[in-house]
Image (cartoon, grey):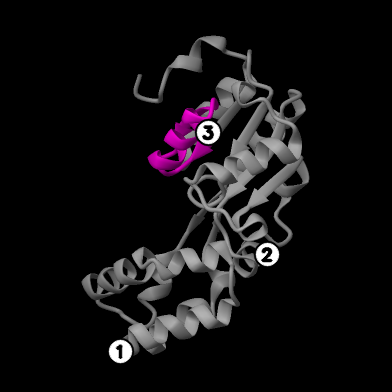
Amino acid sequence: MRYKNIIFDVGGVLLSYRWLEIIMETIPVREEAEHFAKLFYEDPLWLEFDIELRPFDDVVEDYVRKYPEFEKNIRYVLGHLERMPIRRERVWEKVHEVKKKGFMLYILSNYSSRMFNIHTKGLPFLEDIDGHIISYETHHLKPDKEIYEDLFLRYNLNPSECLFFDDRQENIDAGIKLGMDGRVINSEEDLLVYLDRLICEDSKWEMETING
């Protein structure tokens, strides 16, 4: 196989999230909770957490000023970050098997330092990771090309030898433009199928997708 380096996003790939369940603890009507979630997670302020050019708490206060009617909900969600992740232990077991096959493993993810440290604290997959670029470290965000170049430069990676798993098409497309291969992960089962193919050294799968 031509791949030497396997690169993972975290959210939606190595972890799932119970974002709606947490929101519904203060907004019990599902439609209202989904409305809040759309405002909260799709606001450009969210990217300010990830790029970390200013303190986390300053961004929180900007959210509160922008959406004063949701102050209680905003503070509740951001005050319970440790409850947000859902473990993907079957994925982590497969990641360990991929590591044993000789691949180098990396993380490329948009994350604030506070959230990354809380969400990944003590998780076993980190033991198999050879390196990472997280947006808060370099102040660059996917899908901007700079964060991919940060990864290539820090670890001396040849993009043509990299396979990237991410849950967003625009992030995969950006990596492909820079020479990587990539697959969009829509579910835990998607990733398990791809990891099994790597473990089994099935070279035919390189040009396929789950539905192809």
In the rendered view, does 30 fall on the left or right side of 116? left
Is 67 rendered above or below residue 209? below
Question: Circle 1: is it few (<14), some (14-19), or many (20+) Cα within 10 Å?
Answer: few
Q: Picture quarter containing residue 4?
A: top right
Q: Which residue is mark 1?
A: 69
Name the N-terminal-most of marks 1 and 2.
1
In the rendered view, does 59 fall on the left or right side of 64? right
Q: CA distance from mark 2 to mark 3?
A: 25 Å
Which residue in the rendered view is the most extreme toward the top? 204
Q: Position of residue 77 (x, y in %)?
A: 46, 77
Q: Position of residue 47 (x, y in %)?
A: 47, 63
Q: CA distance from mark 1 to mark 3?
A: 41 Å
- In the image, 117 versus 211, the foreground residue is 117
For mark 2, give the secondary structure: helix
Q: Which residue is mark 3?
A: 192
Q: In the rendered structure, which segment of residues is drawn in magenta?
A: 165-186
- In the image, 201 versus 144, the foreground residue is 144
Residue at the spot 62% in from the left edge and 39% down from the top edge: 149
Residue 117 marker = 2
